[in-house]
Image (tube, helix red, strand yellow):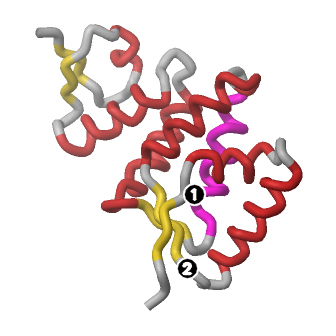
Amino acid sequence: MIPTRLLDTNILLRLILFDDPDQSTRTGELFQQLADEAFEGLLSMTAVFETVYVLERTGYKDNRAWIADSIKLVTGAKGVRFIDNEQRYLLDTLSLYREHAQLSFADCYHAVLALAHCDGEIYTFDKEFRRVAGITRLEP
């Protein structure tokens, strides 16, 4: 059995942004080791959330398609898996994220969870949820 190691947010960012030549090169080598099955990279949705947040704050806010494509590429790399099957919600979340500029990445994830587990019903004061097909926005 190969070892499992958690991947932190900064690893994802170095691979996507290639903004630090030394760290980015070493991260590329790390992902090659994952592909070669030297170990398995474990990823949490919180790392994905942090990555999207940083990308939005570093000049890519208006390029949701690029952010979504970058996240898909990195999280779909050979040897990467999610904690507790969280990945099953990622593609739907990225799809909503691309389509609904008024919703944050977290809101898109919550919409996907509501659709998957609550017949689309979500208690929220955020009126933007009404734009998501299948969502019924409820207020307390």
Secondary structure of the residue carrying numbered label 2: loop
Looking at the picture, how far across and down is residue 3, in whole percent? Answer: 47, 81
**Is residue 38 rendered magenta in the image?**
no
Q: Give the range drawn in magenta.
A: 63-77
Left or right: residue 57 compared with residue 28:
left
Q: Residue 39 carries which label?
A: 2
Looking at the picture, how far across and down is residue 26, in whole percent? Answer: 78, 63
**Which residue is drawn at the image coordinates 19% and 27% (left, top)?**
121
Q: Residue 75 carries which label?
A: 1
Looking at the picture, how far across and down is residue 125, in whole percent? Answer: 27, 8
Left or right: residue 121 compared with residue 104:
left
Considering the whole magenta stretch, tell me its main secondary structure: helix
Left or right: residue 62 compared with residue 79:
right
**Which residue is drawn at the image coordinates 73% and 25% (left, top)?**
58
Image quadrant in which the C terminus is located: top left
Marks 1, 2: nearer the viewer: 2
Of 85 and 128, nearer the camera is: 85
**Image quadrant where residue 35 sits:** bottom right
**Is residue 64 rendered magenta in the image?**
yes
Residue type for callout 2: Phe
Distance of label 1 from label 2 (alpha carbons): 15 Å
Image quadrant in which the N terminus is located: bottom left
